[in-house]
Image: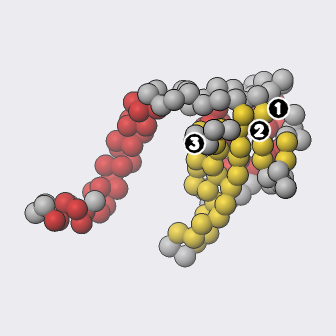
Amino acid sequence: MSEMAAERGLVIDASCIWRWVQVFGPELDKRCRRHLKPTNRSWRLDETYINIKGRDRFLYRAVDSTGQTIDFLLTDRRDAEAAKRFFRRALLNEGNSMPRVINVDKNPAYPRAVEDLRADGTIGQSIVDPGFQTRQ
């Protein structure tokens, strides 16, 4: 963005743009999310690692059966706490219906995260079995 602004004769530091993202990003997300097409109740979750500035990060991603993105989360760790944070974030967003089924890979953090979320009432008892439907 700072390079694009420089082409137009404006001098804006990249750190200034980063501060704008931090301040206005959540508000833009809140205003735009309600206009998105609602997702369906069949979710596919996966995570992959990506290298950012020499450090491995984990990108959690959820899509519905039509391929529409439900949510994503970039985190330092691939553990039950990160999975729980991702589930909460995806479940509490407007437009995301409570899933009927969740397909996941064999990450052992998912069943533990679902058990914890069931215990605190975020996920209902009838939604998904803690074993899930796993993909090979």
For label 3, the residue is 69
Kindly check if marks 3 and 1 are in contact, taking CB atoms under 8 A apart as contact.
Answer: no
In the picture, the quarter occupied by the C terminus is: bottom right
Q: Is 31 situated above or below 6?
A: above
Q: Nearer the viewer, residue 104 or 78?
A: 104
Q: Quadrant of residue 66?
A: top right
Residue 77: image location, x then y, percent: 67, 59
Label count reads: 3
Residue 124: image location, x then y, percent: 78, 24
The circle drawn on residue 102 is 2
Element type at mark 1: loop
Q: Earlier in the sequence, mark 3 or mark 1?
A: 3
* 51 sits to left or right of 118: left
Q: Is 105 situated above or below 43?
A: below
Whether residue 116 appears in this view of the structure is: no
* 8 sits to left or right of 108: left
For label 1, the residue is 128
Element type at mark 3: strand
Element type at mark 2: strand
